[in-house]
Amino acid sequence: MGGTSVSTAVVRSETAGIASGVNMVSITEVNNTIVMAPPDKVFQALSAAYGTLNIPVTEVNQSGRTIGNAAYRVRRRIGDVPTMRALDCGGDSGMPNAETYQLTLAIRSRVVPNDAGGSVVQSTVEGSGRNPTTSATSDVRCSSLGVLEKRIGELVKKTVAP
């Protein structure tokens, strides 16, 4: 799996130059962090990293070494990470929606053995946001900027460092 990136493609159907449909497709890639420690030790550190970031762990698979939260609700900050640095949810009047919207995120990480020794922490973040000051019931898609995934990896490395 490659580095972190999210791309949105706009696909238009045209007949005689007239757009008849627009489709938005988002692709989320996994952020990989190499950690020179055994997978079981890294998995313990991964759980601690979620705790440091105040992300409640609601999904745990010990044998698969995966943890996450499929419906984490947050505003403004995820631990020490401002939401406007971690997510792109569009914006209004120069203010990023990630700063003001109620966000619902799916944050997941897993630890896999690295062929060269050690482990790889693989993390993804996806989500949506809703304006809390209006009666609108539609959500906007939020794309990860890779900052939170990298922070998870940094915290794991810091925990297992000798």
Image (cartoon, rainbow, N blue to C red):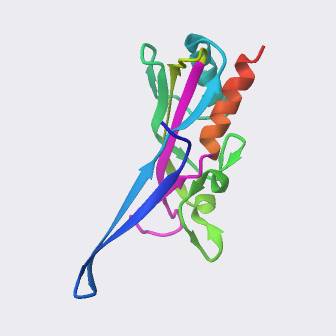
Q: Residue at x 42, y 51 (%)?
A: 27
- Residue 30, x across and y down, in percent: 50, 39
Which quarter of the figure has residue 61? top left
- Residue 97, x across and y down, in percent: 58, 64
Q: Nearer the viewer, residue 4 or 82?
A: 4
40 lies left or right of 37: left
Q: Residue furthest right?
A: 162
Which quarter of the figure has residue 140? bottom left
Q: Is residue 19 magenta?
A: no
Which quarter of the figure has residue 137? bottom left
Q: Residue at x 67, y 37 (%)?
A: 151
Q: Residue furthest left?
A: 15
For the question of whether residue 140 can be seen, the reply is no
In the rendered image, which quarter contains the C terminus? Answer: top right
98 lies left or right of 22: right
- Residue 120, x across and y down, in percent: 56, 25
Q: Residue at x 44, y 61 (%)?
A: 8
For the question of whether residue 4 can be seen, the reply is yes
Q: Nearer the viewer, residue 18 or 124?
A: 18
Q: What segment carries the magenta color?
A: 119-146
- Examine the rendered structure and indicate whether residue 69 appears above or below residue 138: above
Q: Is residue 134 magenta?
A: yes
18 lies left or right of 127: left
- Examine the rendered structure and indicate whether residue 83 appears above or below residue 66: below
